Image (cartoon, rainbow, N blue to C red):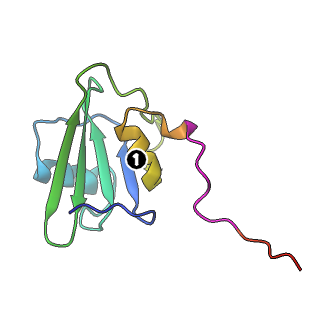
Amino acid sequence: MIQITPQTRVYVAVEPADFRCGIDGLSRRCSSILDCDPFSGAVFVFRNRRSTAVKILFYDGQGFWLCHKRLSKGRFRFWPNETSESSRLLEAHELHVLLRNGNPVETQAAPDWRSIKIPI
């Protein structure tokens, strides 16, 4: 079972990936291009060139999960395009917004942590 907690690191690859490759090809891409360990327990998100599908790679300690979502209509509206970085870090709740074809940058979620002021 895939469980994405608020502490899970989510990396979104900026450049599109060749979706003919499977787990081995995407994990090799994590190591070489994203400079991340695919066995770290982080979630890695890749898109195809046409932005109509995403693949998610995740290692749960026993093996890899590879999830594929293809939109029936349209394209994913959001995708990071920073040319200086090979990936962008997202929060766990932003990944859920991305998978529903929303824009995670425009979410107005509360921050993960905020100090509580106790009245005296």
Q: Is residue 90 visible?
A: no
Q: Quadrant of the C terminus?
A: bottom right
Q: Residues within 10 Å of mark 1 (few under 14, many from 20)?
A: many
Residue 11 pos. (x, y %): 38, 51
Most distant residue in the right direction: 120
Q: Residue at x 29, y 66 (%)?
A: 41
Q: Which residue was labeled with disc 1?
A: 95
Q: Residue at x 43, y 55 (%)?
A: 92
Q: Residue at x 14, y 48 (%)?
A: 25
Is 27 left or right of 6, judged from the image as shown? Answer: left
Q: What secondary structure is the stretch in magenta mostly built from?
A: loop
Dot 1: element: helix
Viewer-side residue, 81 vs 102: 102
Q: Residue at x 30, y 63 (%)?
A: 3
Most distant residue in the top direction: 74
Is 101 left or right of 22, judged from the image as shown? Answer: right
Most distant residue in the front direction: 119
Residue 29 pos. (x, y %): 23, 49
The amino acid type found where label 1 is placed reads: Leu
Please determine whether, in this image, residue 92 is positioned above or below residue 48: below
Q: Which residues are magenta?
A: 106-114
How many numbered marks appear?
A: 1
110 within the magenta span? yes
Which picture quadrant has residue 106?
top right
Viewer-side residue, 73 vs 78: 73
Is 17 left or right of 11, judged from the image as shown? Answer: left
